[in-house]
Image (cartoon, grey):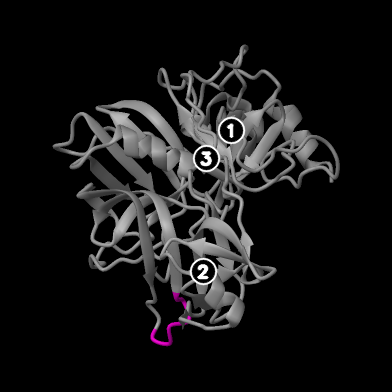
Amino acid sequence: MLLLPLLFALALTPASAPSGPLVDQGEALCVPQVQVAALAVCPAVGPGAYAANIARARLPALIPDLPLAPLERYDPVVEFTYGRVTTPEAPLFASPADGAAGNIARSIGAGFIFVNLVAPVEEAGQAFYRIRTGEYIRASDVIPVEVTKFQGMLFGDQPAYPVAWIVANVRPSPRPGVPPPDSGPRLFRKSVVQIFGTVRVGEWDWYLVGPNQWVEQRVVSRLNLNPPPEGVSGRWIQVDLFEQTLAAYEDDRLVYATLVASGLDEWPTRPGLFQIYARLYADRMRGAYRADGSDYYYLEAVPWVMYYDGQRALHGEYWHDGLGFKRSHGCVNLAPLDARWLYEWSAMGTPVWVYDPSGQTPTDLDEAGGAP
């Protein structure tokens, strides 16, 4: 029980490097105070390395503000109103009168179904919505949904430290690899942090995000910055499938960044270098990719759509709030405000570089892709 306090005491004790060899070429480990003083000649493993890495991870004397530029906020977020169809095979009617009389025109089907609620209508004491197709659906078969107001960041300059979003509510730990306290401050989902140091513990990195505040990388989506892909200049878009982030650049300068939700493992988002080839203010998306059709979806008025790889697109989403995690059939989902900003900033032919720094996403996928 006294081992960790002893290690930290040794790590913080000033020590001069010995004049002779510090460690042989075998399996021996340096003692912590020697490893802190001369990590270069010691194995980067063991308790000494842990203490040395913590000693190196220090907050700056003055934590800088993020160099953000003013960002226009739109209200409403999107001009459409949406609802989830909660009744399987819900009936659709050609008119409110047909609805009141029970004269069904067709069924909307069963699955993951969202409609654009164009206008509420009442007929013979019954409530209906007119939807985007011009048909009518009973209000009792639909639940209106609230669109996320989340939006990423517009940068006026490059950030001095790596930037990340917290993607799950968490209490920071006092040291990497140590369970968080039972009480104390929390970091909430979608809050932005800066990363001031990194220490590896087991399979995962731990990030120093504040005074004695460490969080494991699995609750963080880190923004990784990269130079333009070969042959790319001007405006271009980067999608990081491992971190679930998107960055917009002008040459090598970061302009905008946000969270995304890319394809599930069953329907991955394909890595590669592409170009936007079609842009739609709103689009209807529907389909099923399993043999039994159990994944059927139908989505009306998907906003701010930018197709770049077959059926795969960058587009706004209103049917989930899972940004920072894989959620789609292959498309790159964005919060509507992010999709609008990207739609207005980009153009036909804007390069889209999709990559997975972990190497886990297959690269030999076809263009069929999926949605939403």
SS at mark 2 in the image = strand
Instruction: Say whether disc 2 or disc 1 marks the residue closer to the N-terminus.
Output: 2
Coordinates of residue 259 in the picture (x, y in percent): 48, 43
Q: Residues within 10 Å of mark 3 (few under 14, many from 20)?
A: some
For this view, does 183 lie left or right of residue 11? Answer: right
Q: Residue at x 23, y 65 (%)?
A: 367
Q: Where is residue 364? Give x, y as percent.
A: 24, 66
Would you name the residue on which mark 1 appears? 192
| Amino acid at pointer 2 | Tyr
CA–CA distance between discs 2 and 1? 42 Å
Looking at the image, do the residues carrying marks 3 and 2 touch, with CB atoms under 8 Å apart? no
Image disc number at residue 77: 3
User: Which residues, given as a range, are shown in magenta?
Assistant: 291-296
Say which amino acid is labelled 3: Val
Give the residue drawn at x 53%, y 26%: 38
- Gap in Å between the C-alphas at discs 3 and 2? 25 Å
Image quadrant in which you'd find residue 344: top left
